[in-house]
């Protein structure tokens, strides 16, 4: 999950507001703007690989949350 700013799973969970007018969906490609997080998301796939591209509007405190266990806590938060 791409996040910007302070992120607590208990505050937001994994949901984000979006408008269906901002969605683009084609076979093998999906694009949407996450309004709560101010992030443009693009997803594409091949037969063996899925590729994610995140464009953060906020230029600082951006990260990606990896929850491989899907429990009540976050396994890892990658920040750059």
Image (tube, grey):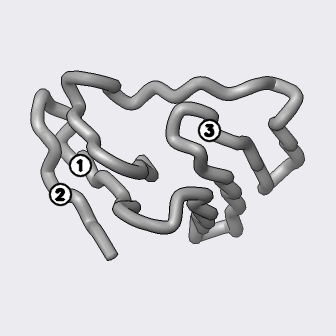
The numbered mark, 3 or 1, whose residue comes first in the sequence reads: 3
Element marked by disc 3: strand
Q: Earlier in the sequence, mark 1 or mark 2?
A: 1
Q: Which residue does the image show at 67% across and 52% down from the upper left? A: 40
| Rendered image quadrant of residue 69 | top left
Neighbor class of circle 1 (other Cα within 10 Å; few <14, some 14-19, many 20+) is: few
Q: Nearer the viewer, residue 60 or 32?
A: 60
Q: Disc 1, disc 2: CB below 8 Å?
A: yes
Q: Nearer the viewer, residue 56 or 48?
A: 56
Question: In the displayed structure, does residue 44 sit left or right of residue 68?
Answer: right
What distance separates the C-alpha of mark 1 from that of mark 2? Answer: 9 Å
**Helix, strand or loop under label 1:** loop
State whether residue 51 is above or below residue 15: below
Badge 2 crowding class, 10 Å Cα cut-off, few under 14, some 14 to 19, many 20 or more, is few
SS at mark 2 in the image: strand
User: For the residues carrying marks 3 and 1, which lies nearer the camera in this image?
Assistant: 3
In the visual, does 12 lie left or right of 30?
A: left
How far apart marks 2 and 3 lie (CA) works out to 21 Å
Nearer to us of marks 1 and 2 is 2
Residue at image mark 1: 68
34 vs 27: above or below: above
Question: Picture coordinates of residue 33 (x, y %)?
Answer: 70, 42
Taking the spot 81% from the left edge, 25% from the top edge, the residue there is 20
Q: Give the mark toward the camera: 2 or 3.
A: 3
Q: Quadrant of the C terminus?
A: bottom left
| Distance from Cα at disc 3 to Cα at disc 1 | 21 Å
Q: Residues within 10 Å of mark 3 (few under 14, many from 20)?
A: many
Q: Which residue is mark 3?
A: 34
Residue at the spot of label 2? 76
Residue depicted at 67% across the width and 67% down the height: 47
């Amino acid at each position: 999950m791409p996040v910007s700013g302070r992120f607590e799973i208990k505050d937001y969970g994994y949901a984000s507001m979006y408008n269906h007018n901002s969605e683009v969906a084609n076979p093998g490609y999906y694009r949407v703007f996450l309004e709560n997080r101010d992030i443009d998301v693009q997803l594409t796939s091949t037969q063996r690989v899925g590729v994610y591209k995140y464009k953060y509007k906020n230029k600082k405190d951006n990260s990606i949350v990896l929850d491989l266990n899907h429990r009540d806590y976050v396994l890892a938060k990658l920040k750059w």
